[in-house]
Image (tube, helix red, strand yellow):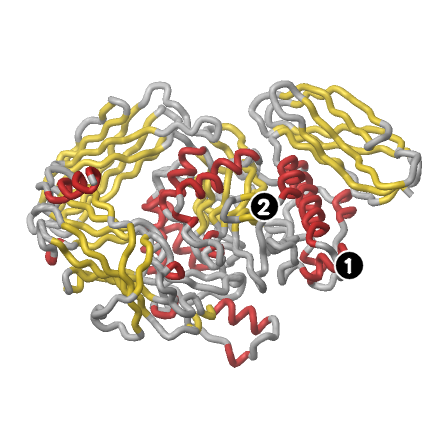
Amino acid sequence: MRLICLLLATSLSSTAARTVIPLNGTWQLAESIDIAQPPQAYPHTVPVPGLAHSATPPLVNIDAFDSREFIQTSIREKKLPESARVEHAGVPRQDRNFLWYKRHFLAPLRTARLLLRIRKAQFGHAVYLNGKYIGDARACFSATFFDLTPAVLWGKTNELVIRIGAHPAVLPVWAPAGTDFEKYKWTPGIYDDVDLIALPSAAHIEHVQAAPRLSGSTVLIETTIRNRGTEPAQLEVLNSIAGISAPPRSVTVPPGESASVQSTIRLPKPRLWSPSDPYLYTLRTTAGQDSIDTRFGFREFRFDTTTKRAYLNGKPFFLRGSNITLHRFFEDPLSKHHPWDRAWVKRLLSDLPKQYNWNSFRFCIGPAPDFWFDIADEAGILIQNEFFIWNGRGYFPPYREDELIAQYSDWMRDHWNHPSVAIWDASNETDSGILRERVIPAVRKLDLSNRPWDNGYSVPTGPDDPVEDHPYLFSRIRGGGNFSMTELMQMTGAKTTNAGHPSAHAVILNEYGWLWLNRDGTPTLLTEAVYEKLLGKVAAPEQRFKTYAYLLAGLTEFWRAHRNFAGVLHFTWLTCSYPGVKTGDHWRDVEKLELEPNFHEWVRESFKPLGLYINFWIPKLRPAEQRAYSVMMVNDDPIPRKGQLTLAFRGGESQTIGFDIPALGAHTWSFRLSAPAAPGETELIATASAPGIEPTRSRRKLVIE
């Protein structure tokens, strides 16, 4: 009760400074076919932030929508006739077009301006206050702002209604609403925070960008002022970090416009942000009566085409991690409200990945709520942040160039102060001239940190931009061909032509495997033929789990050992699991975030910074057969490692040598061993032990006969 009284007192007091009033919680909900005025009755409730599949009572078929890309895939797979093809966003399979969210709030006493911020909502949204239309927006992946001042009842209870699209087809065909060939359910909702911003003056801070510079130990700060008044405004802008201030800068802003001003602060001996030390600074910006705090990390991240490496704070850095396809997890019957539970997200994004020595994720095919980036900042996790576009080759939706530029700009604005955001990713597996030639060049200059850009299967835009590669070797089996791990013994782990173009640029391997299983151990639609080839038509779930973990660990070792990639990120850490899906993750219990045990046993070893790979995949040996074995080692750590490397047959012969591997180095050692004399199953095990770290193992299963 005391907390409620304090909040009410805060909202009713006359605002002498910027005040943020949260509007998260339970909202009332209604549905409609027409885009008419807000309805009279609101028979449902729904959480904000959240998705409409969590409404009470439930909404029938709320996520039933056949997207254009799903229809294209179904035609290609002969599941639909050519006549089913559409050029618009897709076909809804539900009796509604719009959802109406309503709640009441107590407004503060009169201030200069009262803004509404909706951090993310899909699919498009419009705002009404006290029955008056305020405005609308098409953005599904970035924050939008609405000026409520003309309609607010100061110091009184106000009625706020937000109308959102119930499916992507309510948006214009030229506005992006998300494209994903393997997504079956499209659930609407206000899926990020909603709040009010009470401003003390009509001229206020619109946004701030902090861009660290290692050279000179400086922070370049850009402050953008918005004047919502009717007269020109002249303000003095002040910036300070850790007690160090930049000289004040004056800016004049015409009515109804925005203007930016830059300043620089030098930090003597700045503390660098990194996965091992994710230190965060706070920048305080004041302009007139308005002020705002901005959290950032002092770090630089880039790729270099000459060396084909990633660099963090000027030093080579190897990305290790996975992917999170959050918008596919939204489809999962068990997703519920977990994506907005901070403890659940922290375990998913920080606590468990650290056990796997991961330092990076790709937020694949769609964004996450803003607080996910806050957790990544605090945990020292680097994010490849991907815009919600996957359209493949040869086709790109009729999106307008100006709409793409506007939406990419706002999407960047929301995230450019997060040190965790290391790479802008314009698309997944897409070859788009409009993105490559016009959109990326137009927006990349907005980021004063000059982050690198990945753009799916397009050639790179910038001279040091990376490319992505998805070498799905086991996909050959689904296509009627074959693949055996024995082929790896003659391969060098080089970039494939999977991306459709040659490139001398640095490469991120952010998808590989093609071994997915559902959480019950059954194959997905894409892997049925793979497991039939590997294990026969009848196999127990546990047998598949063991095979999946064993082969995925081996592939991870292989790709890392040959050092042809700046990063190795497996696919995928989180997605949906229900009958008919095409990919899968590794959760035994996704609600408790308990992993499938075989994954933990095998894959954890393959991602250790001191990595091992036995270049041997022959499944059978003769008793006492003697042969040479190569063991490859990589050291991702910035310090040298020295210790003992042992290669041994379980229950048989072993050999131990000393190793001394430099920081960020790689080396290969040769052993000669005799296989066990007794027939039966065994393992060939390489173990590297060094002071101060866990031992690393690489293992091969084989049979003596």
Relative image position of residue 264 (x, y in whole percent)? 27, 29
Query: Observer-nearest residue: 428 or 654?
Result: 654
Q: Which residue is mark 2?
A: 570
Label 2 sits on what residue type?
His
Query: Observer-nearest residue: 205 or 324?
Result: 324
Relative image position of residue 683 (x, y in whole percent)? 80, 37
Number of numbered markers: 2
Q: Which residue is mark 1?
A: 536
Q: Residue at x 57, y 50 (%)?
A: 585
Please identify, in this view, whether the residue under mark 1 or under mark 2 is nearer the observer: 1
The answer to whether 161 appears left or right of 498 in the picture is: left
Above or below residue 210? Residue 469 is below
Give the number of the disc on residue 359.
Answer: none
- Identity of the residue furthest to the front in this view: 1
- In this orientation, does residue 213 appear? no
Above or below residue 394? Residue 291 is above
The answer to whether 577 appears left or right of 404 in the picture is: right
The answer to which of marks 1 and 2 sits earlier in the sequence is 1
Where's the N terminus, which quadrant? Answer: top left
Label 1 sits on what residue type?
Gly
Decide: few, some or many residues near mark 1? Use Cα within 10 Å; few <14, some 14-19, many ≥20.
few
Q: Quadrant of residue 239?
A: top left
Relative image position of residue 543 (x, y in whole percent)? 72, 50
